[in-house]
Amino acid sequence: MLVLVSDPDCMARPRSAVDLLTDTVRLLLADHKRELLQPLARCHYGTGRPLGSTTQQERILTVRAAVLKKLGGPPEYGEFPEPTSARDHTIVRVAAAGVHHHVLHVASGSFYTGPPELPSVPGSDGVGRLPDGRRVYFDVTRSPFGSWAEYASVPEAACLPVADGIDDATAAALGNTGLAAWTALQWRAGLQPGETVVVLGATGSLGRVAIQAAKALGAGRVVAVDLDSDRLRALSTQGADAVVAIDGRDDLAERLRNAADGGADVTIDPLWGAPALAAMQAAARGARHIQLGTSAGQSLEFTAAALRSHMMDLRGFAVFRCPVDVRREAYRMLTQHVADGNIVIDLEVVPLSEVATAWDRQLTGAGTKLVFDIADDPHTPERRS
């Protein structure tokens, strides 16, 4: 019998029959082990999904991602370990993800939820497809697998349906800021038809959606407030009934009261600081002041007597604190309004590979909603066998 042995030393020393038999058994066992492992090597992300056009021995161990390596960022574009399966979670193939102030705040380590893991992938929301092909928006991810990557680990309950007739980038742009604007008005403020709404920070992404959302929800009058600019004045043709400039003069409260025809019933406030104080002083009796952010300051001084005299409700708000059923219905209605043309989103799509530039633009004020196009990003990290 002729036996082929892979041991290179077999030509350098005499081989007994026992040696030859031992080598043969070892090779047969190794081949059997490879056959058992090949089906596992053809799956990825712990979901049992095939990799597609790969060799039998290849397994993708990394995904394209923006990777946060130090608090404050910016993230670096590169590779990150693939998401793993977890109980009550699914793996979403991400198509688009928004760039939000909230994400930058979390990455700084100063957000009240605590600092993120390092290294990790930033991003809490995005639009993508489930393993069964359904398109969803999600606004929760499992750390460290955020949405600024090819794949994200998402709680199954956090997957919200997206209305037809809206593209992935627009659907992602509506997340966080758009959803926050809608739920702040409808759910937290309980806006009623005919009421007057003041939107502070109106030229920002949240503010522009809030103006249109207030009209869609039946507001009788909407006042846009922000720093004096052409963008602010343009809002008078985009749903605002009046615009008021923050220009350093000390009569802001009076001008707000006049623009609101006697006082606002609801104020959407992502600013705080002096603009919020003026809005409170100009509010109607029984007004609801919805506090979402601190872009203009961390504190203000407002007397208890003024609060009592206005009988005002000061309500803190964070969109991720909304019950998931509220978010699901709000997102469905919001995306439907966009699909029907009632709400228009100003956005700019950028590749994920430009994450550092997008990060800096968001820090300094991008002037539009930035959305990462992850599905068509041209750069592909190396695959590991």
Image (cartoon, helix red, strand yellow):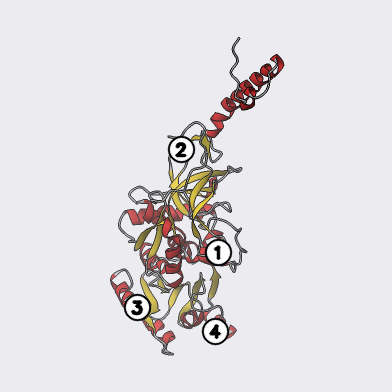
User: Which residue appears farthest toward the left when viewing the image?
Assistant: 237
For badge 3, the amino acid type reads: Val
Q: CA distance from mark 4 to mark 3?
A: 25 Å
Q: Earlier in the sequence, mark 3 or mark 1?
A: 1
Q: Tag 4: residue type? A: Ala
| Front residue (pair 254, 179) | 179
Residue contact at pointers 2 and 1, CB within 8 angstroms: no
Front: mark 3 or 1: 1
Provide the residue designation for mark 3. 243
State the image coordinates of residue 358 (x, y, percent, origin top left).
42, 64
Compute the Cα span from label 3 to label 1.
Answer: 34 Å
Marked residue nearer the N-terminal end (1 or 4): 1
Mark 1 burial class by Cα count in 10 Å: few <14, some 14-19, many 20+: many
* Res. 174 visible in picture: no
- Mark 2 vs mark 3, foreground winner is 2
Dot 2 falls on a residue whose secondary structure is: loop
Badge 4 is on which residue? 306
Q: What is the spatial separation of the Cα atoms under label 1 and label 4, in whole angstroms?
A: 37 Å
Disc 1 residue type (three-letter) = Ala
